[in-house]
Structures are given as structure tokens and as C-alpha cells.
């Protein structure tokens, strides 16, 4: 039977992170990450570790290098404020490398197990 879990975490810094799921028996196959800082500043991404991509609603851009890249309009300038890549999964855990975090950011994720 499929399992799904949604969670929100506050990211304060860069580096390798382990996000612990509420269900320690859930072994994710894929995850969707998203960040929203304003109604028109939302970014989402997908990863199954083998394939990853992200897109930004405000700037209509995308890449296949990171799982989520988030931009904000700061003083009229497109500014990257958050970027992360899912690096792996384990029972009840998601491994994420945060490469950019210029401000405290709420990272939302949905983890799926098929």
C-alpha cells in the first residue's frame, strides 16, 4: 500500500540535513519540495534521487541540477535565497543538501512511498 507524508521544516543554514519523517517505516521513493514566500514567489521541485528538477513561478525558470531553487524579488533584483538537492532516502528519513540559505526558509515536502 502506498504511503504519503507531508511536513514543513524551518531551514536556518546551509549544509547536509536529515529530515525525519513522522512515520519511521515510510521509505520514500520520491519527494516534492516547495517554498513559498509570497503569492507570486513560489518554487517547487521533484526528486527520486536519480532525476531531479525545479521551477520558479515568478520567473518561469527551471533547472535539472537542484531539487528546489527559490528566488525573491529584493529591491527589484532577482535574488536566489534558497537552493537544495535531495541526496538520498532511508526508512523515515530524507537527506537534503542545502547549498543556499540567505534567510530563514520554510521548506515544505511531500514524501511518497509506492
Image (tube, rainbow, N blue to C red):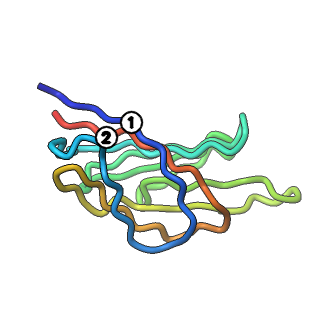
Label 2, on which residue?
Answer: 111
* Quadrant in which the N terminus appears: top left
* Coordinates of residue 23 in the picture (x, y in percent): 23, 41
| Image x and y of residue 102, in percent | 66, 68
Residue nearest the observer in this picture, 51 or 43: 43
**Quarter residue 67 falls in:** bottom left
| Percent x, y of residue 107 | 51, 50
Residue occupying the point 68% across, 46% down = 59
Q: Which residue matches tag 1?
A: 6
Seen as rendered, the residue at the extreme right is 75
Left or right of residue 101, residue 64 in this image: left
- Please determine whether, in this image, residue 65 is positioned above or below residue 68: below
Crowding near pointer 1: few (<14 within 10 Å), some, many (20+)? some
**Element at badge 1?**
strand
The residue drawn where x is 32% and y is 35% is 5
Q: Residue 85's x, y, as percent?
A: 40, 61
Q: Is residue 63 left or right of residue 12?
A: left
Residue 89's place in the image compared with 35, above or below, is below
* Residue 54 sits above or below residue 114 on the image: below
At 66% across and 55% down in the image, what residue appears? 71
Q: What distance separates the C-alpha of mark 2 from that of mark 1? A: 6 Å
Which residue sits at x=35%, y=56%? 19
Neighbours of disc 2 within 10 Å: few (<14), some (14-19), many (20+) = many
Tell whether 59 sits left or right of 63: right
Query: Nearer the observer, disc 2 or disc 1?
Result: 1
Image quarter hosting the C terminus: top left
Secondary structure of the residue carrying tag 2 is: strand
Would you place residue 36 above or below residue 79 in this image? Answer: above
The answer to whether mark 2 and mark 1 are in CB contact below 8 A is yes
- Marking on residue 92: none
Which is nearer the N-term, disc 2 or disc 1? 1
Amino acid at each position: 500500500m502506498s504511503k504519503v507524508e507531508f511536513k514543513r521544516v524551518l531551514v536556518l543554514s546551509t549544509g547536509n540535513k536529515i529530515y525525519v519523517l513522522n512515520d519511521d517505516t515510510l521509505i520514500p521513493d520520491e519527494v516534492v519540495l516547495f517554498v513559498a514566500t509570497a503569492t507570486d514567489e513560489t518554487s517547487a521541485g521533484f526528486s527520486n534521487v536519480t532525476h531531479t528538477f525545479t521551477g520558479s513561478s515568478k520567473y518561469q525558470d527551471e533547472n535539472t541540477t537542484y531539487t528546489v531553487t527559490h528566488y525573491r524579488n529584493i529591491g527589484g533584483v532577482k535574488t536566489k535565497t534558497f537552493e537544495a538537492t535531495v541526496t538520498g532516502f532511508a526508512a523515515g528519513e530524507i537527506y537534503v543538501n542545502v547549498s543556499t540559505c540567505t534567510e530563514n526558509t520554510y521548506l515544505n515536502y511531500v514524501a511518497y512511498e509506492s
